[in-house]
Amino acid sequence: MKIEVFPTSAALARAVAQRLAKTLSKREGAVLLLPVGKTAVPVYREVVRMHAAGRVSFRRATTFNLDELQVRPTDPRSFRSFMEEHFFSKVDLPRDRIRFLRGDASDLEAECARYERRLARDGPPDVAFVGIGVNGHVAYLEPGRSLAPRTSPVRLSASTRRSLAADGLRPVPRGALTVGIETILSSDAIALVASGGRKAGAVALALAGRITPRRPASFLALHPRLEVFLDREAARDLSTTG
């Protein structure tokens, strides 16, 4: 496990954007597994800036997203809409290389199976860029007795729904589709990114060494190429939690 701590969230975003650009420079046809959320916004902003400066191209890349709410793709609350606003519409990623879960599919289990087949055909991802929830969730794998191994429909926890509501997403859907923990771990590399003091406890618990479905992000420590990117606030509890 490689842990890097940056003095500011801006420095953190630049470092993660450079990590993604490095992946594309090594292999133009790279496959990226991407998140949404507050932590991702400044990273995508920096990636878009690098693209505008001619420092990175996505014309041969393929992207998958970690999750989607159970809403229509055109719904303003959808994660597809988030990605269109912050990333897809601002870079040279071909539309036919965007892979996304359909949250409004009539058969959610079949939709999840389709997504896994597509990941198997296009992947494995060169890098999975993932965040962490305040309750330790990764993607939408919520704390519990077990974690879905592969892409599955899930019910969102009350704490996750409160966080989404606080971010202005209302009304908050009760369900989502999410990649599984084995799906994430199948990636060649994982970049875990966290910013802000609200994530400090979850980060410390995830990286403290005990792997349990009660801390879904703790499973990331099983990966031989886990890279952890934190700002100073998110890293503040690392030395005090065991």
Image (spheres, grey):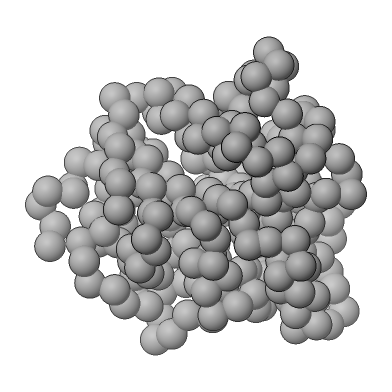
Residue occupying image coordinates x 40% and y 23%: 11
In the rendered view, tell whether residue 88 sits above or below residue 115: above
Q: x, y percentage for residue 162?
A: 50, 58
Residue occupying image coordinates x 81% and y 31%: 92
Q: x, y percentage for residue 36?
A: 61, 47
Q: Is residue 52 left or right of residue 168?
A: right
In the rendered view, tell whether residue 54 sits above or below residue 124: above
Q: Is residue 81 left or right of residue 179?
A: right
**Residue 133 sits in which quadrant?**
bottom left
**Residue 214 sits in which quadrant?**
bottom left
Residue occupying image coordinates x 74% and y 35%: 58
Q: x, y percentage for residue 151?
A: 64, 75
- In the image as oriented, which residue stretches furthest toward the top? 53
In the rendered view, tell whether residue 54 sits above or below residue 44: above
In the rendered view, tell whether residue 170 sits above or below residue 16: below
Q: x, y percentage for residue 202?
A: 31, 57
